Image (cartoon, coloured by chain):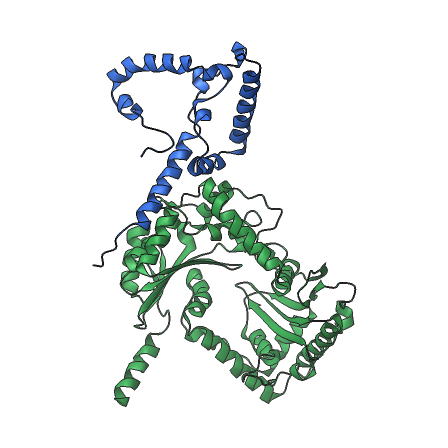
Chain colours: A blue, B green
């Protein structure tokens, strides 16, 4: 039912300034307490990648983005083996926790939906 | 019945040509011819062939980028919608022009003109489309050309004959590092306003002009058109090891300047293509070609230069040598002081005239032959094609032919380079 990105209320919350003012601190606190930033990850690194659409989106990253992603995953695996988070200077700051993959996933999803639409359409002649 | 038929065919003949090129209010050159056929075709012709390219292979990449996603519809949407209408979309690249063509049933022109123009005005040129769809086809084009020694020989011959400009290959080199940004930048210049001619067949001039203005009018493609310097002819020799395929030799001569009818006549005189199937034809070369070898004449006129030559192919290098010697001997005879017999010249002129006139009968030939003239703002009348041969006589022919063979030959050998002949061994 939902794509690889899951359901989100973010567009609705962002559209209202007062709502955003109330929810933003809670969201920031929640993202920090999830702990992935302590392992040097960005949020999009946690996206389930064992899907065709996400694989296609991953192929659309620039070579630099692909390299950085691989580096973050390796570094976090090593930290996991050591049973300790990374030193504090290696944590992902909030400013760098960008959705670098989400736009690609969305465009792949839109393409898949469009293909489904063309595959199942009924043509009526004028 | 007979009377009506003749009168209607007379009307059709009168209308068959791009007699008038209208410059639309927005500054587009629009030319259309309507023969009342059930299908229509519209071509956007850009002066953006490989001779204008800024980086090797970028023209080929732009050709393969055609009909990918635009601001109006995605690549998939373009294909599916065109299929629903039953039309065909194609892109063709020559050394001088890039042509985007849509062929469709009469009445669907609004959609197809919009498909063509929306690519020219709002193509997205995304990186992922370039990597997923365009790069593989660019490579495929280049590999297909590489595996055909005839195509490879003519391509190399252009590089030797004209070096830059006309010499740049139609195919991307294997070492090219083109990015989607390069293609986008090239497209911005190629799709500039003064650089396009809109050609229609099976569609009236007014309808086409109206549609083009509607969809092009609001566009902001105001970049400057790509530039190239005038061609000059150099010539040279190269030998390339071939893998499989026939042993191939190309021997050519070129001249700079607008193409004249004389070289087309020389081509018709020497051409080994018989007028009747299974016969040998009247060509002076045909009789002395050994079995298993073939000699094709190649005459390629461009806007400011032309290349004439022989493509000699055989299973063995000896066959190539013998056939090549026969071809050069015939060329020397035709271009020597006394020229060719009057009767032979007359039949060659007739053959050349027919070939040229026959080419503009078809839709493709009409667009390729007259499209360039429309783009240059010249008289694009079908009768102008045959008019070029009216001035051909024995003296002009002898002069053009002897000037042609005075130039340094372009010689390309592909195949077993240790056995294939050198140009002096063929009698040059």
Q: How many marks?
A: 0
Furthest-left residue in view? A126
Instruction: Specify whether A63 is left or right of B201.
Output: right
Please determine whether, in this image, residue B110 is positioned above or below residue A97.
below
In the foreground, B336 or B17: B17
- Name the quadrant containing residue A33: top left
Residue B204 falls in which quadrant of the image? bottom left
The C terminus of chain B sits in image quarter: bottom right
In front of the other: B110 or B143: B143
- Visible residue check, residue B225: no
Q: Nearer the viewer, residue A113 or B282?
A: A113
Among the 4 quarters of the image, the one containing residue B208: bottom left
**Up-down relation of residue A26 to residue B303 (above or below):** above
Relative to B89, does residue A119 appear above or below in the rendering?
above
Quadrant of the drawing holding the N terminus of chain B: bottom left
Residue drawn at (31%, 34%), measured in percent from left and top? A1
Between residues B153 and B317, which one lies in front from this camera angle? B317
Q: Locate residue B45, reporting x and y percent.
A: 42, 58
Q: Residue at x 35, y 78 (%)?
A: B13
Quick check: can you spot residue B304?
yes
Percent x, y of residue A123: 25, 55
Q: Would residue A80 appear left or right of B191 to someone viewing this image?
A: right
* Residue B249: image location, x then y, percent: 69, 67
How far across and down, in percent of the image, does residue B332 sit?
A: 70, 78
Report the residue at 43% width, 67% height from top: B364
């Amino acid at each position: 039912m939902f794509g690889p990105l899951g359901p989100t209320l973010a567009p609705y919350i962002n559209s209202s300034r007062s709502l955003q003012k109330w929810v933003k601190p809670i969201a920031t606190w929640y993202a920090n307490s999830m702990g992935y930033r302590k392992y040097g990850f960005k949020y999009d690194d946690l996206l389930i990648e064992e899907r065709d659409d996400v694989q296609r989106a991953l192929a659309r990253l620039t070579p630099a983005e692909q390299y950085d992603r691989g580096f973050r995953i390796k570094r976090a695996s090593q930290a996991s083996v050591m049973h300790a988070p990374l030193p504090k200077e290696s944590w992902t700051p909030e400013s760098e926790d960008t959705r670098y993959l989400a736009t690609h996933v969305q465009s792949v999803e839109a393409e898949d939906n469009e293909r489904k639409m063309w595959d199942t359409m009924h043509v009526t002649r004028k | 019945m007979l009377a009506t038929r003749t009168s209607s065919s007379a009307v059709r003949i009168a209308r068959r040509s791009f007699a008038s090129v209208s410059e639309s209010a927005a500054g587009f050159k629009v030319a259309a011819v309507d023969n009342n056929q059930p299908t229509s075709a519209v071509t956007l012709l850009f002066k953006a062939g490989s001779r204008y390219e800024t980086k090797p292979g970028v023209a080929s990449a732009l050709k393969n980028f055609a009909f990918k996603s635009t601001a109006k519809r995605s690549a998939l949407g373009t294909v599916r919608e065109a299929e629903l209408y039953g039309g065909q979309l194609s892109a063709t690249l020559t050394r001088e022009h890039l042509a985007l063509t849509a062929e469709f049933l009469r009445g669907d022109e609004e959609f197809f003109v919009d498909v063509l123009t929306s690519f020219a005005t709002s193509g997205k040129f995304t990186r992922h489309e370039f990597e997923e769809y365009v790069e593989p086809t660019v490579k495929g084009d280049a590999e297909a050309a590489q595996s055909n020694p005839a195509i490879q020989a003519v391509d190399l011959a252009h590089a030797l004959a004209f070096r830059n400009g006309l010499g740049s290959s139609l195919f991307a080199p294997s070492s090219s590092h083109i990015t989607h940004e390069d293609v986008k930048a090239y497209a911005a210049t190629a799709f500039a306003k003064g650089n396009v001619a809109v050609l229609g067949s099976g569609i009236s001039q007014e309808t086409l002009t109206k549609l083009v203005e509607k969809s092009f009018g609001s566009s902001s493609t105001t970049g400057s058109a790509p530039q190239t310097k005038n061609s000059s002819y150099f010539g040279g020799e190269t030998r390339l090891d071939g893998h499989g395929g026939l042993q191939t030799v190309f021997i050519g001569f070129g001249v700079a300047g607008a193409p004249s009818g004389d070289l087309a006549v020389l081509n018709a005189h020497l051409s080994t293509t018989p007028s009747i199937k299974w016969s040998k034809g009247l060509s002076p070369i045909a009789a002395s070609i050994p079995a298993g070898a073939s000699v094709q004449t190649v005459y390629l006129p461009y806007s400011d230069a032309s290349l004439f030559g022989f493509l000699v192919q055989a299973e063995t290098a000896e066959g190539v040598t013998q056939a090549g010697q026969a071809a050069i001997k015939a060329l020397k005879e035709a271009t020597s002081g006394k020229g060719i017999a009057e009767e032979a010249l007359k039949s060659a002129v007739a053959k050349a005239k027919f070939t040229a006139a026959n080419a503009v009968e078809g839709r493709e030939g009409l667009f390729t032959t007259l499209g360039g003239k429309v783009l240059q703002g010249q008289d694009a009348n079908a009768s102008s094609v045959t008019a070029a041969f009216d001035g051909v006589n024995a003296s002009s022919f002898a002069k053009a032919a002897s000037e042609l063979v005075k130039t340094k030959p372009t010689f390309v050998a592909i195949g077993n380079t240790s056995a294939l002949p050198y140009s002096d061994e063929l009698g040059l």
